[in-house]
């Protein structure tokens, strides 16, 4: 399968995140994609360098003031104190109910809170460059599919599906899958189905397309009554305005078996077939794996081959975009299994 990699992903390498109030090593680490690239190269896969500038498309899915902030966030942080080069910025205050989010604070950490949904999305010096190159990889993969390729894979980190119109969160900064869907729309697809199979609900993607009928968003994920991101991903969220009826959430309890998960995949595929789409984007989170350290589904490595097989039977031009998956050493096998299942 045509595969784009992210040549700058290693520049996004924050050291710590918060977990149960403690600072712990980041789960979303460079080794994740190193393992996927290793598995791809081991089977002779050529890795292409991004060749499309995603900037115009980023402006279609993210707010200008958010993009402007993110692009210079690290410089703003260093301008406060050169010693910040060795310190990770974390938000500590957010404009929740009754507080104003129309004003942009002069205080950097307050701005960071304005543009964040959680304190679980650490930044590093190379975060913008890595996120932008990842969005370029997604735009590149989608462009080839729009031009007639059967499928393409965007092998990138940081992931994207928690990033909303004007906020980062859940290890995500730029919404790569939304970029891919928007590129497909810009280049002629009348409707795009965006299927998110990451363990965590793709709140950012849902929010970007919630009032749109041209991108059908479907997500299978851990029930947000107990699982991150908690505040979105519930079954009664079906879209609004022109987008009414074009959002489908299929939450499953933590601990759900592979058999039940595949039943949900059948429901998702049935909806894609009944509503119709010219192209498919898959937010390919692999944290549904039984060995994932922060998630609670139970797919075995061999099950990922079945995922690919089932998606291929939709018969749609398809862009796969890597999202989560934190059992780093198994990530290569699991990603390759999806792509092999799709192609066999
Ligand atoms: N601090 C994705 O899979 N935090 N994001 C979990 C550990 C949120 C996962 C608790 C997990 C976000 C793309
Ligand atoms: Zn996830």
Image (spheres, rainbow, N blue to C red):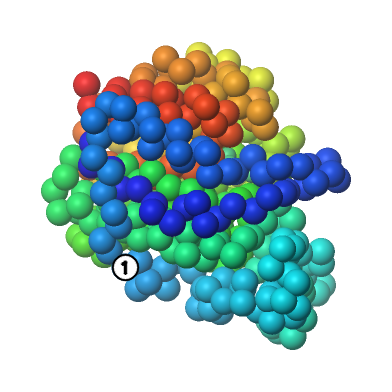
User: What residue sits 25% from the left and 34% below the top?
Assistant: 45
Q: How many marks?
A: 1
Residue 131, position as x, y percentages in the image: 48, 60
Q: Quadrant of the C terminus?
A: top left
User: What residue sits 53% from the left and 78% below the top?
Assistant: 68
Residue behind mark 1: 53
Please indicate, yes or no, whether residue 280 appears anywhere in the rendered image.
no
| In this picture, residue 60 sits left or right of residue 112 | left
Compared to residue 281, the image places residue 80 above or below, namely: below
Q: Quadrant of the N terminus?
A: top left
Q: How dense is the environment of label 1, judged by Cα within 10 Å: few (below 14), some, or many (20 and up)?
A: some
Residue 103, position as x, y percentages in the image: 71, 84
| Outermost residue, left side | 148
User: What residue sits 73% from the left and 70% below the top?
Assistant: 84
| In this picture, residue 302 sits left or right of residue 70 | left
Ligand 2 sits in which quadrant?
Answer: top right
Label 1: which secondary element: loop
Foreground pick, 205 / 267: 205
User: What residue sits 74% from the left and 35% below the top?
Assistant: 226
Compared to residue 326, the image places residue 177 above or below, namely: below
Foreground pick, 333 / 248: 333
The quadrant in which residue 81 appears is bottom right
Residue 178, position as x, y percentages in the image: 42, 56
Foreground pick, 124 / 266: 124
Compared to residue 20, the image places residue 67 above or below, namely: below
Please indicate, yes or no, whether residue 324 appears anywhere in the rendered image.
yes
Foreground pick, 258 / 212: 258
Compared to residue 27, the image places residue 239 above or below, namely: below
Residue 28, position as x, y percentages in the image: 60, 43
The quadrant in which residue 228 appears is top right
């Amino acid at each position: 399968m045509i595969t784009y990699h992210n040549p700058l992903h290693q520049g996004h390498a924050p050291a710590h995140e918060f977990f149960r109030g403690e600072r712990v090593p980041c789960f979303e680490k460079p080794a994740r994609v190193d393992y996927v690239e290793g598995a791809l190269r081991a089977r002779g896969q050529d890795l292409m360098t991004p060749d499309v500038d995603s900037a115009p498309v980023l402006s279609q899915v993210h707010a200008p003031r958010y993009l402007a902030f993110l692009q210079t966030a690290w410089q703003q942080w260093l301008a406060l104190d050169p010693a910040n080069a060795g310190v990770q910025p974390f938000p500590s205050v957010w404009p929740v109910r009754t507080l104003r989010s129309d004003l942009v604070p002069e205080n950097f950490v307050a701005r960071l809170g304005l543009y964040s949904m959680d304190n679980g999305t650490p930044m590093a010096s190379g975060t913008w460059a890595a996120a932008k190159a990842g969005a370029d990889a997604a735009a590149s993969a989608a462009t080839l599919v729009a031009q007639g390729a059967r499928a393409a894979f965007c092998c990138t980190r940081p992931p994207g599906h928690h990033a909303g119109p004007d906020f980062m969160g859940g290890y995500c900064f730029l919404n790569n899958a939304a970029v891919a869907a928007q590129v497909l729309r810009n280049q002629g697809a009348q409707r795009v189905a965006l299927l998110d199979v990451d363990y965590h609900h793709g709140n950012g993607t849902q929010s970007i397309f919630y009032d749109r009928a041209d991108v059908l968003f479907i997500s299978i994920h851990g029930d947000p009554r107990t699982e991150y991101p908690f505040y979105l991903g519930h079954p009664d969220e079906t879209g609004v305005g022109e987008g009414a009826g074009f959002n489908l959430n299929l939450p499953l309890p933590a601990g759900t078996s592979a058999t039940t998960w595949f039943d949900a995949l059948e429901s998702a595929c049935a909806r894609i077939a009944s509503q119709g789409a010219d192209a498919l984007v898959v937010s390919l989170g692999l944290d549904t794996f039984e060995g994932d350290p922060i998630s609670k589904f139970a797919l075995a490595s061999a099950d990922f081959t079945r995922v690919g097989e089932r998606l291929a039977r939709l018969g749609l031009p398809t862009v796969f975009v890597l999202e989560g998956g934190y059992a780093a050493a198994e990530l290569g096998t699991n990603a390759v299994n999806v792509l092999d299942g799709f192609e066999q």
